[in-house]
Amino acid sequence: MAALAFGPSGFGFGVVIAIGLFLLMARRYRFSLRTLLIVTTLFGTWLGLKVGHDMKLQRAITDITNAGGHLKVHDRRPNFPWGLWAERYHLHFYALREPLTGGQLARLELFAPSSLWSLDLTNSGITDESLRFVARFANVQSLSLANDTYATGERIPGRPQNQMSDAGFAKLRGMRELRSIQLGGTDVTDECVTYLLLMPNLKCIYLDGTKITGSGISRLGTLKELWLLELNGCPISADGYKELGQLKNVRHLALCDVGMRDADLEELNKMWQLTSLFLWKSNVSEESLKRFSDEHPNCRIQRLRD
């Protein structure tokens, strides 16, 4: 109980300050017995609610940890009415052998909407239905709903697979604070771009192995903060490369196993801002690569070998 009272929420400090203020005021002012009883009752009510809240949160943390979750403190922020300070966490699930159950995901509801800075649900078996537990964390900065893939965008087998469609992703359209999102290896299509555009602060988008085409790529140009885009294994057509070449803010671009040819690389010539370009299993000739490299001296081309 002592650990609860003086835990990370700052409750213990709140008690000390409240008692200190009350004693200070008591020395300067006279209170009637009625006032004292009212103050004591209010404080006791808050104390009971606070302890109940902390106990539920501690059980939720235990359940999440037992399910394979890893919590790491990111920072501490003001927390009203449960204490002076509350911690924001990175919550990641690593190497799960079984998908998370609905009951395990429901434990996320005991966390305050502002208590997560990043949430990694890679290969956790999440579905369109269970995304409702994620949507409430509107202040999350980094989110992964991906399935791990090879560099080609192909899913890595033997792991719980996330089953997410465009309709499910639509539930997350209120997460406007996102800076990074990973959707690789899922079944999203160009339709999901409609909801990505509602997240104006996005800087990094990972779409490896999805069904994104040139139609979706062309619309990403409205995301002015976007600087990293990974499209490994996506079905990009010749017209898609033309649309890709219009993205003026992207500095890091990954295009492994997308069937790129010399003519497709030429469509990227106007991307003077590029600093890194990842290629693998491309049909681009060494001559074209050298020419592109000479014209873009600030771009590091990493042509991974088979």
Image (tube, helix red, strand yellow):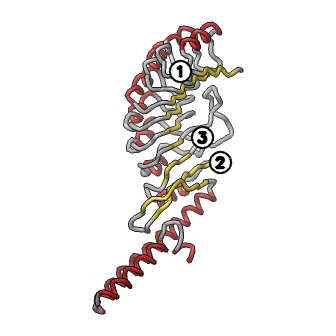
Q: Earlier in the sequence, mark 1 or mark 2?
A: 2
Q: What is the x, y in percent for residue 145?
A: 53, 41
Q: Quadrant of the C terminus?
A: top right
- The correct choice, above or below, for 71 with respect to 217 in the image is below
- The correct choice, above or below, for 281 with respect to 288 in the image is below
Q: Quadrant of the N terminus?
A: bottom right
Is 305 left, or right, of 71 in this rendering? right
Q: Earlier in the sequence, mark 3 or mark 1?
A: 3
Q: What is the x, y in percent for residue 43?
A: 38, 79
Q: Earlier in the sequence, mark 3 or mark 2?
A: 2
Residue at image mark 3: 161
Q: Is residue 6 visible?
A: yes
Residue at image mark 1: 235
Circle 2 SS class: loop
Q: Residue at x 67, y 22 (%)?
A: 304
Mark 3 crowdedness (10 Å alpha carbons): few <14, some 14-19, many ≥20: many
Mark closer to the observer (3, 1): 1
Q: Residue at x 56, y 61 (%)?
A: 61
Q: Residue at x 63, y 33 (%)?
A: 149
Mark 2 crowdedness (10 Å alpha carbons): few <14, some 14-19, many ≥20: some
Is 162 left, or right, of 134 in this rendering? right
- The correct choice, above or below, for 276 with respect to 172 in the image is above
Residue at image mark 2: 96
Check if mark 3's residue and mark 2's residue have beta carbons within 8 Å. Answer: no
Q: Amino acid at mark 2?
A: Leu
Check if mark 1's residue and mark 2's residue have beta carbons within 8 Å. Answer: no
The alpha-carbon separation of the residues under discs 1 and 2 comes to 29 Å
